[in-house]
Image (spheres, helix red, strand yellow):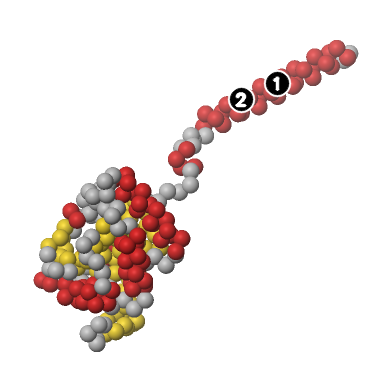
Amino acid sequence: MDRLMKYVFVLALVALLGGVAAMMVLASRATAPAIDPAQSAAPQKPVLKIPPFALIDQTGQARTESVLDGQVTIVDFMFTNCPLACPVMTGQMQKLQKRLAGTGVRFLSLSIDPGNDTPAVLTEYIENRFKIDTANWLFLTEPPERQPRFIARSIFANDLMQFVEEQPADKIKTSVGGEMSNINHAVNLFLIGPDRRALGWYNSQRPDEIEQLFDHALNAAGQFLPKGK
């Protein structure tokens, strides 16, 4: 084979191999599934929402989910006999209440121990243990005839996807001198928007997350409550 024929043969071979490679690329593009940009992005927090409920406040007045509708509310789930986490959560809520005064942000605490947290017990907790300003802060529990149905605990665990577990083997003292099973639970505070959806949740034991909650609550008040009302 002379030099010209060798040159022509090499060119033909290169062209053939290039065509095969191109066909393989096209075939892979045709068979590979399309990538959804949303799926390739960083994982997003799930959309959580507080459902309808029927409870009573610390005065015995019937309350429903309407206390959240159209409002910006910081919510926690607690019980008055909690020895450690709940007093910290209540203290953080109290500090936020003072810092957010005049913004229109409201506060709500739901008892996950309605069997012990009667309106009278909640009132003692509010007035004597913490001296809480209830002008824009409600405490909710079960009506006496329905105790304990654990509506708040169900909302906490199921609708807001938080850890909560009664621990019969771990006994704690009650405010009236008895004993009860400890309730181990998550310590998050929730920022709830006017449609009852959680705008965010924040670890009450982390100062940086409390600062985030303050900033986000302030922004939410400006967005949903322009006049702070």
Q: What's the amino acid at mark 1?
A: Leu
Q: Position of residue 96 (x, y in %)?
A: 34, 62
Residue 8 position by quadrant: top right
Q: Is residue 29 visible?
A: yes
Q: What's the amino acid at mark 2?
A: Met
Relative height, residue 215 to residue 183 (above, below): above
Label 1 sits on a secondary structure element that is helix
Q: Residue at x 60, y 28 (%)?
A: 25
Residue 73 position by quadrant: bottom left
Label 2 sits on a secondary structure element that is helix
Q: Which residue is under mark 2?
A: 23
Q: Which mark is residue 35?
A: none
Relative height, residue 32 to residue 149 (above, below): above
Q: Position of residue 79 (x, y in %)?
A: 27, 72
| Mark 1 to mark 2 CA distance (whole Å) | 11 Å
Q: Residue at x 30, y 58 (%)?
A: 101
* Mark positioned earlier in the residue sequence (1 or 2): 1
Q: Residue at x 37, y 76 (%)?
A: 84
Question: Is disc 2 surrounded by few (<14), some (14 to 19) or many (20+) residues within 10 Å?
Answer: few
Q: Nearer the viewer, residue 224 or 168?
A: 224
Q: Which residue is under mark 1?
A: 16
